[in-house]
């Protein structure tokens, strides 16, 4: 079965600093999703990547999918306290129609 | 983005009773809905996948008779936790997507279930 491994598991950065979260899949990714979650709340959709080499940006968040489609990175530029939360990468598990998730990365941004 | 409404957001029930959680897609037709369970400070664990009009497909280790899933229409899926016990206390989240293949999945707000 396909698995997603996220790193780091947790991250504490000073406000204004850049950071990167990685998501590695055990199998080829056909759809890679990034979500943000505040603990105890629903998930907020950030971005979806499909093509090898694809890169998307939204405000100060950029996500990339590598050419081999087995790894994605999420980069936040000039982090702010509002970026704090849990970042989850999700993927379609082959042709099963299932959406699976990595274990999440908890981000804290210190003012 | 599309809106998925989950209700209730919080529920407390007595051990042995059943609880129903609803998940509605408000502005699109959800051909597929997913139910997840999330333990504190952990990721989402997929419980089951349901397609409209079909029986849900449960993940290994998830009891079908305990977690009843119904996806009777393209806008509504329900999860019923039967004969709830304290160990069923958790955060349950639904997700919905339309169409086939790689499409966006939208999430409900989650339901915090506490069994006392």
Image (spheres, coloured by chain):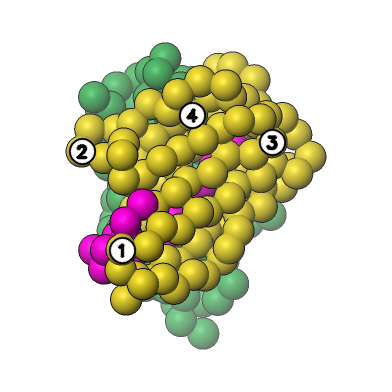
Chain colours: A green, B yellow
In the shown orientation, is residue A31 left or right of residue A12?
right
Q: Residues within 10 Å of mark 4 (few under 14, many from 20)?
A: many
Q: Is residue A31 magenta?
A: no
Please indicate whether residue A75 sits to the left or right of residue A101 in the image: right
Calculate the distance from the C-alpha at mark 3 to the C-alpha at mark 4. 12 Å
Q: Earlier in the sequence, mark 1 or mark 3?
A: 1
For mark 2, what is the residue? B61
| First in residue order: circle 4 vs circle 2 | 4
Q: What is the secondary structure assignment of the residue under circle 4? A: strand
**Which residue in the structure is indicated by mark 3?**
B75
Q: Which residues are magenta?
A: B82-96
The disc, 3 or 4, on the residue closer to the chain's N-terminal end is 4
Report x, y in % for residue A25.
31, 31
| Nearest to the observer: residue A38 or residue B58 | B58
Instruction: Provide the chain ID for the residue under circle 4.
Output: B
Q: Residues within 10 Å of mark 2 (few under 14, many from 20)?
A: few
């Amino acid at each position: 079965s396909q698995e997603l491994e996220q790193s780091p598991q947790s991250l504490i950065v000073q406000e204004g600093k850049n950071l990167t979260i990685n998501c590695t899949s055990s199998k080829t990714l056909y759809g890679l999703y990034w979500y943000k979650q505040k603990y105890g709340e629903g998930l907020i959709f950030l971005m979806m990547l499909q093509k090898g080499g694809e890169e998307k940006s939204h405000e100060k968040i950029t996500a990339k999918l590598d050419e081999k489609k087995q790894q994605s990175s999420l980069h936040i530029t000039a982090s702010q306290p509002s970026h704090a939360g849990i970042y989850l990468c999700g993927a379609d598990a082959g042709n099963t129609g299932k959406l699976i998730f990595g274990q999440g990365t908890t981000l804290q941004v210190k003012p | 983005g599309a809106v998925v409404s989950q209700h209730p957001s919080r529920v407390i029930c007595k051990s042995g009773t059943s609880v129903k959680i609803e998940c509605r897609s408000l502005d699109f037709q959800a051909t597929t809905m997913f139910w997840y369970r999330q333990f504190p400070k952990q990721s989402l664990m997929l419980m089951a996948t349901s397609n409209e009009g079909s029986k849900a497909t449960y993940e290994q280790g998830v009891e079908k008779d305990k977690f009843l899933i119904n996806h009777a229409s393209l806008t509504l899926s329900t999860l019923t936790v039967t004969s709830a016990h304290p160990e069923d206390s958790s955060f349950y989240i639904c997700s919905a997507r339309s169409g086939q293949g790689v499409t966006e999945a939208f999430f409900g707000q989650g339901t915090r279930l506490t069994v006392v």
